Structures are given as C-alpha cells and as structure tokens.
Image (spheres, rainbow, N blue to C red):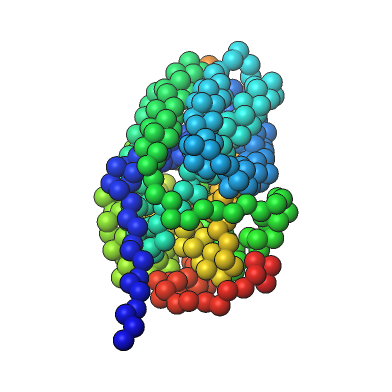
Amino acid sequence: MVTPEPAPALVTVPRGVRIGYGVGSVSTATFSTVPGLLLLFYMTNVLAVPAWIAGIVVFLPKVWDMLINPWVGQRSDRTVSRLGARRPWMLLGALTLPVAFALTFAGPPLTGVPAALYVAVCYFLTATAYAFYEVPYKAMAAEMTDDYHERSSLLQWKMVFVGLAILLSGAGAPAIAGTEAAGYRLMGLVIGAVLLVSMLAAFAGTARAPMVTRAEAEPSIRAQFAAARSSGPFMMLLGLSCAQMFAAGTLLAGSPYFATYVLGDPGMTTTLFLCIVGPLLVTMPAWVWLSRRYEKRGAMILGAALFAAGTAALALAGEFGTVYAHACVLVVGVGYAGFQLLQFSMLSDVIVHDARVTGKRRAGVFTGLWTACETVVFASGALVLGWLLGATGFVESDPGTPVAQPEAAVTAMLYGGTLLPALIAGISILLTARYPLTAAALATPEPLRSAEG
C-alpha cells in the first residue's frame, strides 16, 4: 500500500508580522485620505486657484502613476538584496514621501496660477515617492500566504490600521489646517511625520515576513500591460475597483464643499468624515464573516449597494438637515469599509489565480498596474468635480476675501458630490456580479497555460 504524501502545511503569517505589515497601511490610508479630502479645497479656497485648474493639478500627477507604478512593480519583482525584494523600495519611499508631502502644503506666498504650479511640482514628486512605497507594500500580501481565507485574515489586521489612520487623519488634518495657509503648513508637517513613522515601522516589522512564492518580472512595461490583459479576473477586478474609487474620490473631494456651502458649517467636514471612516473600526469582523458566508463577490455587492444608497439619499440633506446627512454618511461608511477590505483581498486572489494558470508569479506587475489605475481614477473624481464647479461659476477665493457662491455652483456641489458617486457605485455592482473567482474556483486545479494564452 502506498501512503499518499501529506498536503503541504498552511503557512500562517506570525502575529508580529501581521501587526508590522498592518502598521504600514497607516501611511497608505493617510496619503490617500488627506490630499483627496483637502488638496482641491486648499487650492480653491486658500490659494485662490481657479477650480478647473485646481482639478487638473490634483489629477495630472496621478497620470504619472500609470508609468511609475508599473516600473516600480517591475523593478521590485527583480530586486535581490539582503533586505528582500520589496523592502528596499519601501525604505526609499519612507525617506522621500514625508518631505515631498510637507512641501506640497508649505503655503508659499503665492496665489492663483503661480501657486498652482508650485503645488503641481511638489505633488508630482509626492506621487513618485509614494509609488516607491505603495507598490511593493501591497505586493507583499500575495507573497506571504497562498491560502484564500488566510489572506482575508491578514488583511483584516491591515484594515484595522487603515480605519484608525483614516479616522485620525481625516478628522485631524482638517482640524489642524483650519482655513489659513499657516494651518495647512502645520498640517503638512504633522502628517509628514505620521507618514515617516508608519513607513519605517512597516519596513522594520516585515523583516521576518514569510515568502511562500517569489514574483517574476516582465521584461517591459508593454509586457506588463499584456500580462494584465491576459487575466480576465484581473481586468474585471480592475473595472469594478476603478468604479468604486471614482465614486469614493468624488465624494471625498466634495466633502469640504458640501459641509461649507450645503450644510453651512466648514467644521462639519470633520464630523462627516468621522461618519465615513468610523465603521471601518467596527465592521471589519462582519465583512470578513460576510465574505466567508456569501463569498467575497456577494459581500462586495452588498458594500457597493450600501454606498450607493447612502450617497443617493445624501442628495436630500438640504431638505432634511445635518442629522439626516450624518445618518446617510454612516450608511456610506459601512459600504466603504467593505470596499477597503475586499478589494485588497480579491487582488491577492487574482495574483494567486494567475500563478496557477500561467505558472508565473507576477505580484509586482498586477499590483503596480492596479494601484496606478486606482490612484488615477480616485484623483479623477476631484478633476471632474473641479470642472463641474468651474462650469457652474464657482468663484475661487482666499481666507481674507471670502465670496458668496452662485446658486448653480452650490447645486453642483450638492448633486455632483452625491448622485454622481451613487451612479458610479451602481455600475460597480454590475461589474462585481461578473467577477468569477470564488473559494471553490481557486480550489479547483486548472490546466496550466502560457501567460500569452
């Protein structure tokens, strides 16, 4: 009788590594939150930059991500060092991003177009520095474990820190910044320090991270795009994630305007944001359970439906008041929590699936392209909102000369920041329904095929 060989033991990620990896998401969440929440408003209402120009400034550095992120993914796939493949790049980002971020909000004595040019250069450098850290950091999750549910468990720790970071930065940054250039300058320094500590902590905390597989590099950027197109699950995930990020980016960029001109109190930017991110801290276990009970696809559809319903209902805030507005945003926050957890977990599944059907490990390739598209689409929310405000007559200003906005611009702030995100979130539901990867699908062996096939 021949005794069958035992199945390979599941590689679990040690708790210390989970915490160390999770701490690194403080920087990614903070950087995604603060510019998305404040940069457009900072330029239009502090630096007196026309809204349509401000939208372009927020958006263009993210177009650069379409090149730099895949390049970093490729280079980190190829890196061989005593620190590992990913961690040298994470360290480079940790040493450059905080400085570039602080300079973006340094508040030089400039207004109008000169101020826009200054912010554009600094934000371009910031986007480059962030790519050095973000791409290898996100690629590590797929390399630590091959288990479908272990990845969700690992990312649950990550999302706890995401929730804390978004909560503290989203509430704290507007409170520190206030309405004056000096406040924004101080905010830039404080957030820069938070970024530095988080990134260095993740670099140190992942020193003992297990690596069950090692990614392979594609020879060129063109080959990376070809690899992405060859994976149907990746393209489907990319589409639904982009729809969700556009919706979230539009909502986030519109929050200061909504609080200031619809609810009549700029200070409510903080309380509205607390309602968005508060659920991140308490609903993660529920989303993990839902992903097991109804698959990640079903849980993602529920999250998108809650986000869409909450943002659509928010359009009536002008009639029903501030309590109603905050209740709607709480519903949005529950759905947004699902986005945050499930997108990253599903990306890891896509990477594992691609390895099974092609025989290649391309974590850096997929992560680089995914993060590039995600950041571009997220920033395009601010671009579209800026153009919408400009088209409806929004008047730029500085703190010393506040102006009354035309009714058309206020209407654009209300509906552009609510109904538009709701519509796009609804589109993401349709795309999610076609997402093919489930636990059963990943457990079923597939015939090996070439990456080009």
Pick the residue in front: 203 or 129.
203
Tally of numbered discs: 0
Q: Is residue 160 left or right of residue 192?
A: left
Of 229 and 389, the residue lying toward us:
229
Residue 405: name its quadrant.
top right
Q: Is residue 346 left or right of residue 76?
A: left
**On screen, residue 445 above or below 326:** below
Which residue of the protein is positioned furthest toward the bottom in this rendering?
1
Residue at 49% across / 63% down in the picture?
A: 352
Residue occupying the point 68% across, 25% down: 117
Residue at left offset 36%, top offset 37%: 205
Q: Is residue 263 above or below residue 336?
A: above
- In depth, the one of 39 and 375 nearer the eye is 375
Specify whether 372 is left or right of 161: right
Does the rendering let one see residue 361? yes
Question: In x, y percent, where is residue 165?
Answer: 37, 37
Q: Residue furthest top?
A: 109
| Image position of 250 with respect to 401: above or below | below
User: Residue 120: where, in percent of width, then height?
Assistant: 65, 29
- Asked where in the image residue 297 lies, by quadrant, the reply is bottom left
Q: Can residue 266 be seen by looking at this rendering?
A: no
Residue 49 position in % (x across, y down): 63, 27
Quadrant in which the N terminus appears? bottom left
Classify the position of the C terminus by image quarter: bottom right
Identify the residue shown where x is 69% and y is 67%.
452
Q: Nearer the viewer, residue 38 or 257?
A: 38
> Does residue 448 lie above or below 80 as drawn?
below
